[in-house]
Image (cartoon, rainbow, N blue to C red):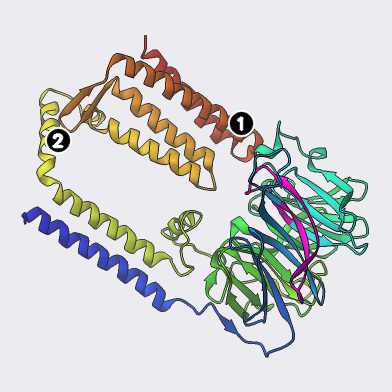
Amino acid sequence: MRKSTKQAAKLYGVALLVVTAGFAIGLATAPNISTNNVAESDQRNIVGVQQSGEIHITTQSGERIWSYGNASAYFDVDSVDESSVLAAFTKKSQKCGDFDAPCTRTGFRIIDTGSSEITHQWTYPVRDEFNSEVHDADLLPSGNVILADMEYERILIVNPKSESVVWRWNASSYYTRPPNPTRTDWLHINDVDRVGPDRYMVSVRNKDQILMINRNKTVVEVINKDRDHSILWRQHNPQWLNNDTVLVADSENNRIVELKNSDGQWNVSWSLTSAGGVPLDWPRDADRLENGNTLIMDTNNNRVVEVSREGDVVASYTTGNFPYEVDRLPGDENLGGPSMRQQSVTSGSEIDHVPVLTRLVEWSRPVLPLPFWVGEIQSFSVLVGILLVVVGTERLLQPLSAPLLGHTVELRARGKSILEVLEAQTTVGEILLGIYIVLFSITSGSQTGIKLGVGMALLVDGWRRTRGRIRIANKKFNLPETTTLIGNVVISSAAVVASLAILYTGVVFPGSLLLDLGISTLLMTLSISVLNSNQ
């Protein structure tokens, strides 16, 4: 075995040991996520799990009493009475209307918990399984069901017996409608609650706003008019507590907040960012109970947690993967308990400092299902492990790197600058990195336009700099003129399409308009540069 191979093997082994030790420390010191500090009672929780398509009725300690599936996903789940539940759901179907089969149908169903039979159901087909679902459905005093429709971005009231729509409000009456809202995640209306006679509260996630509308279809109040992310950021399931306070799962800010109205201005009056020593991670539901406690669905931590007014954990337990909502039974989630101001509480559990490396974990969670205890130590161990692997790989490839080193020395001897040397050696790497980022942008769920723009910029610039000549180490390959011409046209066209798509995203979601405009302009410039190289 060569000396370089032995060195590489040792470094790989140390890397594995460091990463394993870091994760072992995290697992050993992780807080117990399942705790129960309440006496056993008749109170139950109902849990809707999105990823596995299940509903569970549990005790406060998490013991399952009743479960039901028969769906692709469940979202909002409510008690209708002591023997039935109302649930918003999606399910695969061959009955697709104008869409190709198989498709997804979404809507609501009422299920008898005794017989596990569906007593009422209302559904319709949607274009896409994701971002087109009915996320919320609530029973009204009239016996009708009000629901939030994300496919067509509207609020509907449906008579479950006749299966007819008796009232609707279209979001396009307030927001500027894109050409075809069913082909983009435009507003993502994810919740609607009745907060008074003929008065409804609507959560518009992608606008970071909560609307109050009346039966006459008039918007009478807007919470977070300026779309200030320090107030709300892609929220879920707001709960009306009283005339001047709303409790909200502020999902993208990883916290639960109370927003208080003071002279028409809504501001954060209380917030909770952790429970039981575990930071909240993309919570999607929070209900204030009659006793003043707060019941939370901590989605990315896959747990239900109930905290007291002081922020202490009363009960906590794990759920199925990617849960959506939890409600207390019996009860009505629309009838919120006292606000923290009414309980003389002014602050919750806060995390004042988020370590730098923990940001890596936050950025990774949408792609990787990381455990809740992965944090600073684990991030550091992974970075050290990567460094050791890179050094080990360099040792392993050292015999192969001599030609590359020799070529660099040759270029320097010919009077080439350091930048010219780097340009000669990095074109292929830039192209490959660009392709990777483009592919990653397609599979990731946030900031897609920015990632796509960066990836396309690297890809186009790398191709532009090859000038039909690809160099790997000290080997140079000249592409046929026809291949180079076709490549120029294809890559520049792809850059133009990406540029227009990113610009459109900036117009629809103006919060990142300037950045999207800059990336779009850069891609257009690179595209023109590539086409000019044909001349």
108 falls in the magenta region: yes
Camera-side residue of 108 and 518: 108
Q: As shown in the figure, which amino acid type bears the numbered disc 2?
A: Leu
- Residue at 68 percent of width and 55 percent of height: 90
Q: Please tell me which of labels 2 and 1 falls first in the chain.
A: 2
- Asked if the residue at tag 1 contacts the one at tag 2, i.e. Cβ–Cβ closer than 8 Å, the answer is no
Camera-side residue of 183 and 288: 183
Q: Position of residue 151 (x, y in %)?
A: 72, 44
Query: Badge 1: few (under 14), some or many (20 or more) residues near its Cα, within 10 Å?
Result: some
Q: Position of residue 99 (x, y in %)?
A: 68, 39
Q: Position of residue 359 (x, y in %)?
A: 46, 57
Q: What number is the disc on residue 504?
A: 1
Q: As shown in the figure, which amino acid type bears the numbered disc 1?
A: Tyr
Q: Which quadrant: the N terminus?
A: bottom left
Q: What number is the disc on residue 404?
A: 2
Q: Secondary structure at mark 1?
A: helix
The residues tagged by marks 2 and 1 sit, at their Cα atoms, a distance apart of: 43 Å
| Looking at the image, residue 137 lies above or below residue 416 | below
Q: Is residue 58 left or right of residue 486?
A: right
Q: Is residue 392 left or right of residue 51?
A: left
- Residue at 62 percent of width and 61 percent of height: 50
Q: Quadrant of residue 195?
A: bottom right
What secondary structure prevails in the magenta region? Answer: strand
From which residue to which does the magenta span run? 106-135
Q: Is residue 226 visible?
A: no
Q: Is residue 91 left or right of residue 202?
A: left
Q: Secondary structure at mark 2?
A: helix
